[in-house]
Amino acid sequence: MDNMKKPWFWLSVLILCFSLHTNLSLGADRITANQSLSGNQTIVSAGGVFKLGFFNTGNSSNFYIGMWYNQVSEQTIVWVANRDTPVSDTNSAKLTISGGNLVLFNESQMPIWTTNLSSTSSSSVEAVLLDTGNLVLRQGTGSDYFWQSFDNPTNTWLPGGKIKLDNKTKQPQYLTSWKNSENPAPGLFSLELDPKGTTSYLILWNKSEQYWTSGTWNGQIFSLVPEMRANYLYNFTFESNENESYFTYSMYNTSIISRFVMDISGQIKQLTWLEPSKQWTLFWSQPRRQCEVYGFCGSFGSCTENSMPFCNCLTGFEPKSQKDWNLNDFSGGCQRKTQLQCESSSPSNGKSDRFMAIPNMQLPKHSQSVGVGNAGECETTCLNNCSCAAYAYDSNGCSIWNGDLLNLQQLSQDDSSGETLYLKLAASEFSESKNKKGMVIGIAAGAAGAIGVLVAIFVFLMLRRRKRIIGTGRSVEGTLMAFGYRDLQNATKNFSEKLGGGGFGSVFKGTLPDSSVIGVKKLESISQGEKQFRTEVTTIGTVQHVNLVRLRGFCAEADRKLLVYDYMPNSSLDSHLFHERNSNALDWKLRYQIALGTARGLTYLHEKCRDCIVHCDIKPENILLDADFCPKVADFGLAKLIGRDFSRVLTTMRGTRGYLAPEWISGVAITAKADVYSYGMMLFEFVSGRRNSEPSEDGQTKFFPTWAANVVTQGGDVLSLLDPRLNGNADIEELIRIIKVASWCVQDDESHRPTMGQVVQILEGVLDVNLPPVPRSLQLFVENQENIVFFTDSSSTQISQARSNVSTTSSQAQSQSQARSNISSSSSKSLSEN
Ligand SMILES: *[C@@H]1O[C@H](CO)[C@@H](O)[C@H](O)[C@H]1NC(C)=O
Ligand SMILES: *[C@@H]1O[C@H](CO)[C@@H](O)[C@H](O)[C@H]1NC(C)=O
Ligand SMILES: *[C@@H]1O[C@H](CO)[C@@H](O)[C@H](O)[C@H]1NC(C)=O
Ligand SMILES: *[C@@H]1O[C@H](CO)[C@@H](O)[C@H](O)[C@H]1NC(C)=O
Ligand SMILES: *[C@@H]1O[C@H](CO)[C@@H](O)[C@H](O)[C@H]1NC(C)=O
Ligand SMILES: *[C@@H]1O[C@H](CO)[C@@H](O)[C@H](O)[C@H]1NC(C)=O
Ligand SMILES: *[C@@H]1O[C@H](CO)[C@@H](O)[C@H](O)[C@H]1NC(C)=O
Ligand SMILES: *[C@@H]1O[C@H](CO)[C@@H](O)[C@H](O)[C@H]1NC(C)=O
Ligand SMILES: *[C@@H]1O[C@H](CO)[C@@H](O)[C@H](O)[C@H]1NC(C)=O
Ligand SMILES: *[C@@H]1O[C@H](CO)[C@@H](O)[C@H](O)[C@H]1NC(C)=O
Ligand SMILES: *[C@@H]1O[C@H](CO)[C@@H](O)[C@H](O)[C@H]1NC(C)=O
């Protein structure tokens, strides 16, 4: 505090105070040479997009200089200056220009973060926050940037930023995760451009262990990220010169707020802000599975996919820091509950260490193989070296692991690649269960009377319960049956006959004691509590329609959640539609009936039941067929059941590319019109008999929906579009109608799409339908350049053609009236009356 005695100190304090009042008032977008920022002062970029100032996280008194969106209601930090040197008193700390650098001084006026440039002239340097989210240091407008935050990213890659590789030093630039949701200090996961110059992005654990690669850039997509092909949101470009190589990206629609983060989960995520729902929506994330993230659960932690939480400590271990685990920071891993005997200072005491078999594990990397002949010697080898933590013995012989075990994964029962890991534990860990038993007996002896009564009540309840189960087969809840897990296990012969898998879990065939046949869906990744689950399921149970699969009951026992449906003998639509050279392909009449029935089922979901249900995953796999080929929509309401986990479901569903409406990607709110889009995509498949995403047998590379929409609008030969297995046997009028409806359903702008109710009326022949324009987004599915040009031209003429048919009666938005006019009533009934 010697400084305080010096006059210049007080002078600078005076200047500081003065400048605070005069210069950093509302609306400032920069810090100039004699200004500084402290307390709750902020600067805001000129267009009001980003804000910079001190922030803290959670409940902590750690403050950081950071940047966040000014207009996003949930404070979202995109850049942090002093990642690992927080300050606690923001009024005495300050961010200022000093010696030509931007410097953060802490409470004791010591520099704790700096742009650290050696060669800037100190006069008239200013730090300006730009609307792109780039904080730049420059000398007046138009000069080069001495320094920019885009060159020093933390965990977020904003549009316009780059993650680059220095071509001279081969030094990559890292995008590094936060340590946990409350600590922006660098975590263990980082993204970099491959220093070998392969144009691949890599994700590394602790900057050493690579666990993901994007694959090389082919000019349009990264080879291992095929979903980029259907991307019409981001413009990714690669640049390379003698100094640096980098990717950068921009938004085609710059009013969409989007960010790319290296998340604390070890996954890279692209998130888009949804203003209507005021939340960030995930639409892309890699690696897909959480347990692919190397070392996610830390040492001696084990990762289990589809479980909540993902991480558990191995038997005999406990989290090193429960607080960090609660923040989803598992990197600290687990520690032994009981010290090994070989580690203890008095090794003569106690029994020697033993091994616990853990089946179905994916073994950790970096084992040491030992040339011994049998499992027993392998065990002895591990036992004899205290630093050995585990061993495994398989066809490759004996492997042992020294030190901490990292990257353990518990595989599911169906995964045959799992092996047994033998984990070294103190002997007392094994006798623990015996000890507890002894204790229970001791207590029981002391309180025999009370226990006796309790046991009697328990037995009575169990008997009653059993009787109820045996007597009626199951208990009743509302219109739904509540099944016991045992009952379903018996009914499905221990889940032996699998009917199919899906986004939410596998379905098994079963037979109830009353010999009715059921389909049992074993739900995965349901994080809901039992009570909430029952409420949701009961709601789904009330939704009944001839074209919806009937939910008969459910099972909710602890984390076992199952749904019981009527069994559908003819399986799902895809098995009939897409089976190659299937002689008994569905005939046209049946296809039309299935299309109509499906539309009726969806209409019911969207319009007729109490709460509108958006299905979110319409595709042939989810249209089941009963004995008479009556279609029944399956899996409705499940998106809601998954609840909080919805974003994960979305990433799974992105696998079924080709049915998803553009708004899933562009980040506007999802409405029933998203189902209409998926339904439209499926209608095209009714016609072609093949998946839109697959090329036809004769090697046609045209994207079928685009082609079909075009043939119809040009008045071409529609029969040439028909599934060749039908040999031209189809009602031409119906065929044209289906393609027209389908084209309307897949319009980019959801207000141009009909409702499912209108689709039903059109398919019933009550309403007529005009020629549709070819949707713009379909063009992006087409890889053939010629087609793109061609359709761009024709679609604009068709739009004007469609407009000329408008018989406008309302002053509504043009798009609305356009949508209505395209479907003009043939029964003299005005559509707006519906
Ligand atoms: C400090 O700020 C004042 C008022 O904005 C300005 O007139 C002056 O030139 C600045 N001084 C320096 C050294 O930039
Ligand atoms: C900033 O802090 C001052 C006192 O520290 C307080 O009076 C003022 O309301 C705060 N302003 C805002 C916008 O929070
Ligand atoms: C915030 O911290 C205080 C004191 O440390 C504590 O009592 C309180 O429970 C914390 N609140 C939350 C939400 O963590
Ligand atoms: C300020 O930073 C210096 C240098 O890093 C450090 O020694 C000092 O303890 C810090 N002061 C406070 C109050 O944290
Ligand atoms: C600034 O850079 C120099 C060398 O360029 C380095 O030695 C020093 O540690 C850096 N200081 C900070 C605070 O980063
Ligand atoms: C990460 O690597 C460094 C050495 O590069 C090592 O000191 C550190 O312990 C590693 N961190 C973990 C969690 O293993
Ligand atoms: C994509 O970005 C590149 C480089 O930023 C630009 O040249 C190109 O015009 C953009 N493409 C589109 C379609 O916006
Ligand atoms: C990197 O620089 C060298 C020359 O310094 C050049 O030959 C090479 O093509 C550059 N690499 C890329 C990817 O541009
Ligand atoms: C590469 O760096 C040198 C020196 O900094 C600079 O003169 C040159 O213009 C840079 N090249 C490109 C393509 O940016
Ligand atoms: C861009 O996105 C905004 C907000 O989502 C939307 O309102 C607007 O219509 C979009 N513009 C274009 C040209 O798609
Ligand atoms: C135990 O294993 C470690 C690691 O392989 C090795 O360095 C050490 O020498 C071994 N100790 C004994 C006693 O064999």
Image (cartoon, rainbow, N blue to C red):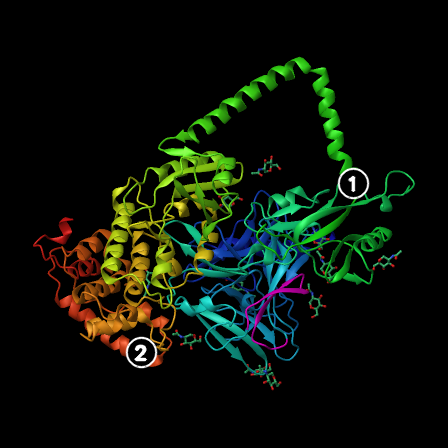
Residue 283, image x, y percentages? 45, 58
Q: Residue furthest left?
A: 828
Residue 776 visible somewhere in the drawing = yes
Q: Which residues are magenta?
A: 196-215
Image position of 808 with respect to 799: above or below = above
Cβ at disc 2 under 8 Å from ligand 7: no
Looking at the rendered structure, which numbered label has been put on residue 787?
Answer: 2
- Disc 2 marks a residue whose amino acid type is Asn
Q: Is residue 330 left or right of residue 348?
A: left
Image position of 229 with respect to 757: above or below = below
- Disc 1 marks a residue whose amino acid type is Thr
Residue drawn at (74%, 21%), measured in percent from left and top?
442
Residue 214, image x, y percentages? 55, 69
Looking at the rendered structure, which numbered label has been put on residue 626?
Answer: none
Residue 387, image x, y percentages? 82, 53
Q: Is residue 208 magenta?
A: yes
Q: Which residue is mark 1?
A: 338
Image position of 728 with respect to 750: above or below = below
CA separation in Å, label 2 and label 1:
69 Å
Quick one: SS at disc 2? Answer: helix
Q: Nearer the viewer, residue 671 or 540?
A: 540
Residue 760, image x, y percentages? 21, 53
Q: Is residue 468 magenta?
A: no
Quick one: SS at disc 1? Answer: loop
Residue drawn at (60%, 77%), measured in percent from left and top?
197
Q: Quadrant of ligand 8?
A: bottom right
